[in-house]
Amino acid sequence: SLLNYLEFQNLGNKEALVSAIKAKLVEFKSLSEEELSSKAALDQATKYNEDLKRINVISTSKYDNDSGKDIEYISITHEDGSVEMLVCEGKSSINDYIKDHADDVATKSADEIFKYFKQTVHNELKFYKESEFETINPNLANSAIIKEDDAKALEVEEVHKYAARRGIEDDIKVTVDPNGERIYIVGDAIMKFHSDFHGERVMDVIQESKIKANTNDYASLLSELDEPENNDIFQKYDTVEEAQKDAKPTETDEFITIDFDRVFPEFNIERLKNLIIQKQVYEAELNADELGYIAQSIAFLIGSMMERAERGELQTEEEITLEDYMHDIVDKYEAIEEGRMNEDELSETDKQLAAKYLENKEKIRALGLQNKPKMLELRDGNNKSGVAAVIILLEMLAIAGFVLLFLSIAI
């Protein structure tokens, strides 16, 4: 609550205070939670340091690896779109690092933290242009478990097809990790291959490209001619009057970025509920305006979740309708994040909606704004972490006391 308050205050020493509180929150979370996977620990840390979203933990199963081993990788996408990759020595390294270096996790950039892993913990993977790999480093190229030329040719062809679909024109780069797994990078995408039950090579995209697919084909150009001139239904408006005057919902499947703060004066909960029932219960075919209205309304409700929580309005029709609508979307989103479902099962728009919805739910929980907030429980089987968590909590309370005292002094 104090962190949330300070972030909106105009104080000379705000950055130092915010950094100190974030560091304690990171440390407290890592000790109070059960043993986390590297991905879960990193996801937890990104709540206090947005830049860490550029780091990706990639877990691969022994069933999808030529080596028959479970292997974990860490990648980073730099600001220029280039990618670096490490193969992990152990599965708890990130969680251990977060526990021991909370100050760094809360304040340092993703590049600095990745550099630490590269220099002190994990093995860097050096990539080569695919056309030059066997000439420049034949020993590394021949260390792959699958060496057959026809298998390698098929893999390169599949990577080319992926790049073409995405509109990526970068050179294909390749390496072999210490386990004998051949890995490809094209643009910001990472892929590897495994043999299925029939011995056929199957491509696994272990990091999807963020580059928007190339749409300069004939069918896409024709469809663009039929689209409205302005199809961004989440365009930001500065005033309610402008929104009322200019905003008309239109149908679209994808948005680059959803503006959850956009004013939407036409919102009506009864109309939204009626349209959702028509679409989901009676499977009616809605027109573009009706589909656009649902999309805008859901984005508006997600963007205003914190306001309703602060007013104690978590049991209103708006919140219940939003929760019902998001239930299946969130289930699919979490399944995709955990690798239990293909990414194509959910549109990019729904992924953004689910991510923002879960982020707000976590903020509401963290700030104790639920109607029945849960009390902190120390686990019996983790006494050492429990004591440490209590100490950190006391330190946080002390920081809060000093800050509030400072704010109460009339200067």
Image (tube, rainbow, N blue to C red):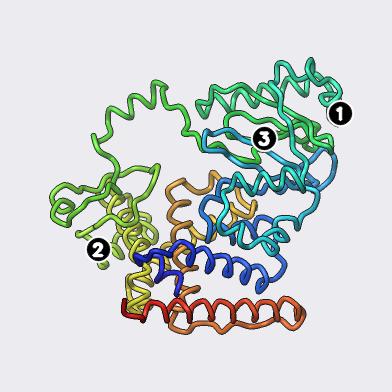
Label 3 or label 1, whichever lies nearer to me, is 1
Between disc 3 and disc 2, whose residue precedes? 3
| Residues at marks 3 and 1 touching, judged by CB atoms closer than 8 Å | no
Residue located 21% across and 52% down the image = 238
Q: Is residue 369 left or right of residue 108?
A: left
Amino acid beneath label 2: Arg
Q: Where is residue 106 in the image (x, y as percent from the top left)?
A: 57, 59
Amino acid beneath label 3: Met
Q: In this view, does 408 lie to the left or right of 168?
A: left
Q: Which mark is residue 191?
A: 3
Label 2 or label 1, whichever lies nearer to me, is 1
Residue underneath mark 2 = 271
Amino acid beneath label 1: Ser
Q: In this view, does 6 lie to the left or right of 136?
A: left
Q: Residue 143 carries which label?
A: 1
Q: Is residue 331 above or below residue 371?
A: above
Residue located 38% across and 55% down the image = 283
Depth check, front residue: 185 or 126? 126
Residue with the most extreme front position: 411
Depth check, front residue: 146 or 226? 146
Q: Position of residue 80 (x, y in %)?
A: 52, 33
Q: Using the rendered image of the protein, determine whether residue 135 is visible from the camera's viewpoint.
A: yes
Between disc 2 and disc 1, whose residue precedes? 1
| Residues at marks 2 and 1 touching, judged by CB atoms closer than 8 Å | no
Label 3 and label 2: CA atoms lie apart by: 45 Å
Q: In this view, does 156 lie above or below 59?
A: above
